[in-house]
Amino acid sequence: MFIQSFGKVTQSLQRLNVGDTIGIRGPYGNWFPLDELKGKNLLFIAGGIG
């Protein structure tokens, strides 16, 4: 997988090896400010149990 490095998060992702563990926190809030996010690059990671 190729991850282009732009900032702290993508640089950290590039240093990971297969099998490494990462922590995810959340969810936070219950909505997305769509007007503020329009035209920006976003990464959504989702999971669930139901």
Image (spheres, rainbow, N blue to C red):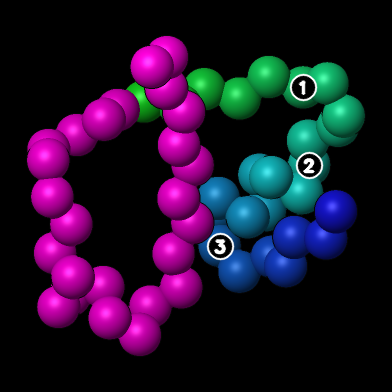
Assign a secondary structure to mark 3: loop
Q: Image point 46% across, 28% down: which residue? A: 47
Q: Image point 42% across, 22% down: which residue? A: 48
Specify the quadrant that holds the C terminus. Answer: top left
Where residue 6 sits in the image (x, y, percent)?
A: 61, 69
Where residue 17 sits in the image (x, y, percent)?
A: 86, 32
Q: CA distance from mark 1 to mark 2?
A: 10 Å
**Which is more N-terminal, label 3 or label 1?**
3
Which amino acid type corresponds to the residue marked 1 in the rendered image?
Asp
Where residue 27 sits in the image (x, y, percent)?
A: 26, 30
Left-right relation of 38 to 19: left
**Which is more N-terminal, label 2 or label 3?**
3
Q: Is residue 15 depicted above or below 31 in this figure? A: above
Where residue 37 sits in the image (x, y, percent)?
A: 26, 73
**What residue would you read off at disc 1?**
20
The answer to whether the residue labelled 3 contacts the one labelled 2, judged by CB atoms less than 8 Å apart, is: no
Few, some or many residues within 10 Å of mark 3 (<14, 14–19, 20+): few
Which amino acid type corresponds to the residue marked 2 in the rendered image?
Arg
Q: Image point 13% across, 50% down: which residue? A: 31
Q: Predominant secondary structure in magenta?
A: loop
Residue furthest to the bottom:
39
**What residue would you read off at disc 2?**
15
Q: Image point 30% across, 28% down: which residue? A: 26
Disc number lying in front (1 or 3):
1
**What residue would you read off at disc 3?**
7
Residue furthest to the top:
49
**Which is more N-terminal, label 2 or label 1?**
2
Which amino acid type corresponds to the residue marked 3 in the rendered image?
Gly
